[in-house]
Image (tube, helix red, strand yellow):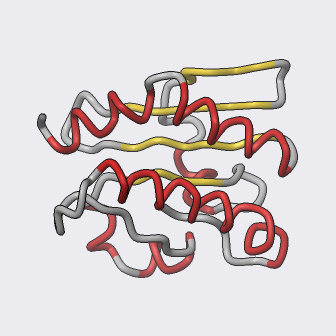
Amino acid sequence: IGPGPTFAPRTNDRPLAYRLKAELDRLGAGNAFRGAVVVSDRWYADNRIFHLCPTVVVGGPGVNAVAAALVDELPMLVKRDGRVFVQGAWDGETKRASLWGLDRFATAMAVDAFLQEGFCAEFLHRVWKN
């Protein structure tokens, strides 16, 4: 899970990333290979090993370099009022999701949509090969 490294993403998006991590860890039921790690977008970019892992990005393309790189690549799954966005693709080799909004409240709504509307469950089903 990768939020951006600057002040606004650290204070607004990182708590959302940790909330998402807690839910993924809970769903992983203690299995060491079914949990999440939170890293910044810079750490993600600098450590290519992460590129092989399923990835959920929290924060928009204006504050998160990974989200900016994925914005044109990932299909739009949710677009609400031009403010809340959930993008994702997990059918192929790489599994990626990007959760963002035009402000911190809209980004929180994107995380909620991912968790509550079946996108997270489908993502984990593909990642964990249930």
Which residue lies at the image location 60% right of the left edge and 32% below the top edge? Answer: 86
Measured as percent of width and height from the top left, residue 1 is found at 48, 61
**118 left or right, relative to 82:** left
Q: Is residue 109 above or below residue 39?
A: above
Q: Nearer the viewer, residue 46 or 97?
A: 97
Which of the 4 image quadrants contains residue 92?
A: top left
Residue 39 spot, x, y in % from top left:
49, 74
Along the viewing direction, whichever of 121 and 69 lies nearer the viewer: 121
Query: Is 66 rendered above or below residue 119?
Result: below
In depth, the one of 87 and 119 nearer the eye is 119
Q: Quadrant of residue 33?
A: bottom left
Q: How many marks?
A: 0
Kindly indicate the quadrant of the structure image that contains residue 129.
top left
For residue 106, side relative to residue 40 (left or right): right
Q: Is residue 40 above or below residue 130?
A: below
User: Is 108 left, or right, of 17 in this rendering?
Assistant: right
Image point (48%, 71%), residue name: 38
Residue 72 image point, x, y percent:
57, 35
**Measuring 53% from the left and 22% from the top, which residue is drawn there?**
117
Q: Quadrant of the C terminus?
A: top left
- Residue at image point 23% right, 58% down: 34
Question: Where's residue 5, x and y in %?
Answer: 68, 77
